[in-house]
């Protein structure tokens, strides 16, 4: 997807990452659709948006994102997990999570 003069936009599952500007980002997020733009703009892209390619590799902030890759995002940013590494990343993430929670419990921290 091309956001017409605002950079490329890339739709992935239940969120959108835009290598450019987005209007009404707060309102879009309030609808339960996370959006991660490079910046916010006051202009609508309605007349400038066109489909360029579907289901193809794109580059966002110098990171290649391929069909099937997993994108995870929150207020601090977005990370791309290559599909072929997803199981290993999940396993290591669980190990780190469990170790961190065990350390906090042993130090008397409350874990919620």
Image (cartoon, rainbow, N blue to C red):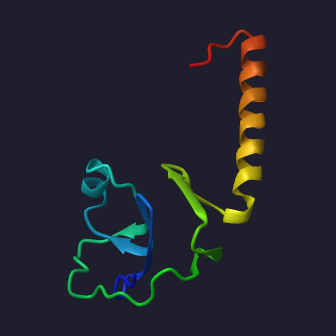
User: Which residue is located at x 37 percent, y 73 percent?
Assistant: 21
Q: In which quarter of the image is residue 48?
A: bottom left
User: Which residue is located at x 29 percent, y 85 percent?
Assistant: 49
Q: In this view of the protein, can residue 24 be seen by the observer?
A: yes
- In the displayed structure, 39 sits above or below 106; it is below
Q: Nearer the viewer, residue 82 or 37?
A: 82
Quadrant containing the C terminus is: top right
Q: Is residue 16 left or right of residue 22?
A: right
Q: Position of residue 90 (x, y in %)?
A: 70, 46
- In the displayed structure, 31 sits above or below 81; it is above
Q: How many marks?
A: 0
Seen as rendered, the residue at the extreme top is 108
- In the displayed structure, 76 sits above or below 109; it is below
Q: Quadrant of residue 98?
A: top right
Q: Position of residue 30 (x, y in %)?
A: 27, 48
Q: In this view, does 70 lie to the left or right of 87?
A: left
Q: In this view of the protein, can residue 82 be seen by the observer?
A: no
User: Which residue is located at x 62 percent, y 13 percent?
Assistant: 110
Quadrant containing the N terminus is: bottom left
Q: Where is residue 34 in the image (x, y as percent from the top left)?
A: 39, 55
Q: Which of 73 and 109 is in front in this view?
A: 73
Q: Is residue 67 left or right of residue 22?
A: right
User: Which residue is located at x 72 percent, y 37 percent?
Assistant: 94
Q: In this view, does 73 lie to the left or right of 35?
A: right
Q: Position of residue 96 (x, y in %)?
A: 76, 36
């Amino acid at each position: 997807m091309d956001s017409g003069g605002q950079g490329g936009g890339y739709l992935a599952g239940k969120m959108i990452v835009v290598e450019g500007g987005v209007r009404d980002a707060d309102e879009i997020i309030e609808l339960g659709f996370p959006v991660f733009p490079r910046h916010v703009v006051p202009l609508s892209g309605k007349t400038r948006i066109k489909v360029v390619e579907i289901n193809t590799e794109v580059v966002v902030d110098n990171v290649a994102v391929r069909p099937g890759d997993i994108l995870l995002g929150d207020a601090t940013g977005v990370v791309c997990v290559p599909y072929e590494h997803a199981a290993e990343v999940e396993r290591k993430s669980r190990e780190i999570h469990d170790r961190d929670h065990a350390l906090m419990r042993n130090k008397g921290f409350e874990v919620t």
